[in-house]
Amino acid sequence: MTAYWLMKSEPDECSIDDALAAPKATVPWTGVRNYQARNFMRDAMQVGDGVLFYHSSCPEPGIAGIAHVASDVYPDPTQFDPESPYFDPKSKPDAPRWLLRDVKAAKKTRLLSLAEMRATPELADMVVLQRGSRLSITPVSAEHWRWITERMLGS
């Protein structure tokens, strides 16, 4: 059964345009440093799951594209790189703390802004819209996925 996710990326690190331009439109989802988000990738995500590609930490945050989970989980190499902002000196190659999955961009959409999402009653209970929600990866219900992709993004 397909699951759905909202995955946040800072567009100056990896935008939907960057993902679409990547070889085979696939990018490794590096830099996740929250245990709950990591556990979603490790325990709940499956190859083929749908992804709402969300631009965060930018002038106008929001959903910028559609993607799919494209790989099984594997260690995030940035945790071992002392030059990386995601370096974790406590993580060891024989016992990695941080994992990732590859994401394959399917298409760029019109930007569905955070403000527009908040103003849409049908989306009011989305995890990303809940007070205090700061996770970079959140589950999306099938109903919200359909509403967003069919009614709001015309996918």
Image: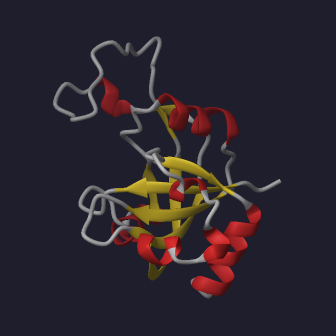
Question: 77 and 67: which one is in front?
Answer: 67
Question: 122 and 150: which one is in front?
Answer: 122
Residue 81 seen anywhere in this rendered image of the structure = yes
Residue 127 pos. (x, y %):
59, 53
Furthest residue to the right? 1
**Is residue 143 rendered to the left or right of residue 60?**
right
- Using the rendered view, name the quadrant where residue 110 is placed: bottom left
Total count of labels: 0
Residue 107 seen anywhere in this rendered image of the structure = no
Q: How is the image coloured?
A: secondary structure
Residue 136 pos. (x, y %):
45, 47
Above or below residue 122? Residue 110 is below
Residue 150 pos. (x, y %):
68, 83
Q: Residue at x 39, y 42 (%)?
A: 30
Furthest residue to the left? 83
Q: Residue at x 27, y 15 (%)?
A: 89
Q: Residue at x 43, y 46 (%)?
A: 134
Q: Residue at x 47, y 44 (%)?
A: 135
Q: Quadrant of the C terminus?
A: bottom right
- Using the rendered view, name the quadrant where residue 14 is placed: bottom left
Above or below residue 93? Residue 85 is below
Above or below residue 19? Residue 46 is above
